[in-house]
Amino acid sequence: MKFFPSAIDGFAMGLGATAALFVLGAMREILGNGTLFDGADLLLGEWAQVLRVEIVHLDSPFLLAILPPGAFIGLGFMLAIKYLIDEKQKKRVPSTTKTYEKEQGCGSHIVKN
């Protein structure tokens, strides 16, 4: 069962990537059209028309959020928010990781406790 931790890690990475893409897509659809699952019936059939949820009524769509550059901008905002959260957590909890110093001349690393 040596593969089990690796399988769990792969499954968790897949779920994390799926969640990030879902949040990014939902954010773009809400900002762009003000809806969720609009046009799902084109993919899933007639029954999927009931899935459409209008979050905000927009008279005209926000085109930048819908087009591909909007995905890159949204991903940048998501990464910036994650960075801010990580920095806030670093200030709250003292670091328990080992730091390494490079010794001059030999190129090896020495653990600094």
Image: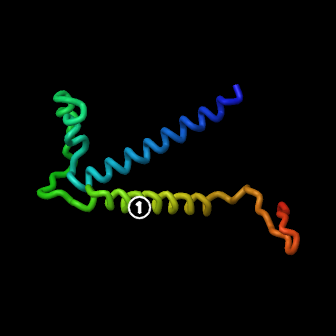
Residue placed under numbered mark 1 in the picture: 77
14 left or right of 54?
right
Q: Position of residue 23 (x, y in %)?
A: 38, 48
Task: Examine the rendered structure and indicate whether residue 72 appears above or below residue 49.
Answer: below
Per the image, label 1 sits on a secondary structure element best described as helix
Q: Is residue 54 left or right of residue 72?
A: left
User: How many numbered marks, from 0 up?
Assistant: 1
Q: Looking at the figure, which quarter contains the C terminus?
A: bottom right
The N terminus sits in image quarter = top right
Q: Looking at this rendering, what residue extends furthest in the bottom direction?
A: 104
Left or right placement of residue 36 versus residue 111 in this view: left
Q: Look at label 1 and name its amino acid.
A: Phe
Applied colour scheme? rainbow
Residue drawn at the location 49% of the way across and 57% of the way down: 82
Picture quadrant where residue 111 is located: bottom right
Residue at the far right in the pictured view: 106
Residue at (61, 63) in percent of width and height: 91
Tell me the residue at 33%/48% (across/down). 25
What's the residue at 68%, 59% (across, down)? 94
